Image: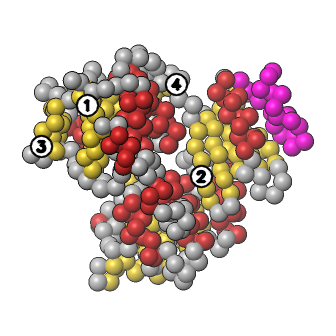
Amino acid sequence: MSHIVVIGAGQAGSSLVAKLRKDGFDGEITLIGAEDALPYQRPPLSKAYLLGEMELERLFLRPESFYVENNITLKLGQRVTGIDPAAKTVSLGEEVIPYDQLALTTGSDPRRLPAAIGGDLDGVYVVRGLTDVDAMAPHVAEGQRALIVGGGYIGLEAAAVCSKRGVQVTLVEMADRILQRVAAPETSDFFRSLHSSRGVDIREGVGLERLEGEDGKVIRAVLSGGEAIDVDFVVVGVGITPSSQLAEMAGLELDNGIKADAKGRTSDAAIWSAGDCASFPFQGKRIRLESVPNAIDQAEVVAQNMLGADKDYVATPWFWSDQYDVKLQIAGLNTGYDNVVTRQGEGQQVSFWYYKGDQLVAVDAMNDPRAYMVGKRLIDMGKTADKAVVADPAADLKPMLKA
């Protein structure tokens, strides 16, 4: 009987094994995860779960009964120590598991501050897993003082949750502006204003020199200009890196993560990859997408291909971020844009449309699901959007879908 082993029990891994069973695979399936918990959603961790608005069980992607009923062997709280592609085996310490096909859905790892500047002090957290958020939760309370390091979406979401809980928040971003790597100045301006209006102290063009501790716990941060501020805890949101160590040890090709082809196959014919850890061809280049939609869609295509479908994965990038009462929805990739058109709605409803020449490439929509929906469909269809229509808040966007 054929045996498929999946390493990485996150969104991609859980989606992959579910799709295998849904599409009729009746062989053995083993899903291996380093965390003790059942596969769970990550986006609510730093928002609803941290705020106490979502219970642990609601985080789980599927109940334990799903895996039992579908004859999926779960090996949780176990770390893979090696892969032998020649022997087609996976090692969990002393235990050796043979496979016929293997999928790597190992996700990503948060970048941490170096120990040399105090990154190993108690009270310094990243926002990635359940244990991170559970450890941080007691600090997120009225009157506490937090330093957020990094002005990307992870840092801004953490700042929003802390601020909502009455924490005094200072956020530092080394770049000239928050969201500089991922968004236009217009989007940066919107979120800077939003956070400032809620009392968050945003420092742009400011780095962290070091953290200072007392009895092993962080008590102070010294910023790049020499200013020292007292802190009760620190949240580090300076990006993530693909978790590709196992693939590298196994001799697989890497390229900004685990290098996969359009079907999700790695440089070893029996090994596949999907999710945050995998890079793949997209519009003549190679990309890696860090998003839940990509993890699900790519994993499901890989599952189909493991069963012989020979299907290319065609990504339709989209993302979201929740901060206070603002829902940001992003369609497309803004790489290479050279102009932005603003569509102003009522109140906090606004969208920014990214163009490369006259071609629409991405949309950032704040509390404007209609603009997001139209923009996403246009991008997915390879169409553009008339700039004059976009800029006119009274103009109906939908006719552009039929043009």
Q: Which of 122 and 186 lies nearest the eye of the viewer?
A: 122
Give the CA separation, mark 2 to mark 4: 23 Å
Give residue 96's position: percent from left, percent from top.
12, 38
Give the CA separation, mark 3 to mark 2: 41 Å
- Kind of residue at badge 2: Ser
Quarter of the rendering containing residue 310: top left
Give the CA separation, mark 4 to mark 1: 28 Å
Residue named by callout 2: 321
- Kind of residue at badge 4: Val
Q: How is the image coloured?
A: secondary structure
The region drawn magenta spans 383-403
- Please tell me the numbered disc located at residue 28: 1
Give residue 95's position: percent from left, percent from top.
12, 43
| 384 left or right, relative to 246 | right
- Please tell me the numbered disc located at residue 95: 3
Kind of element beneath mark 2: strand
Of callouts 3 and 2, the N-terminal one: 3
Which residue is rendered at x = 21% and y = 44% of the image? Answer: 80
- Please tell me the numbered disc located at residue 314: 4
Which residue is rendered at x = 49% and y = 32% of the image? Answer: 297
Give the CA separation, mark 4 to mark 3: 37 Å
Of callouts 2 and 4, the N-terminal one: 4
Tell me, yes or no, whether the highlighted magenta stretch contains residue 197: no
> In the image, is residue 392 above or below residue 350?
above
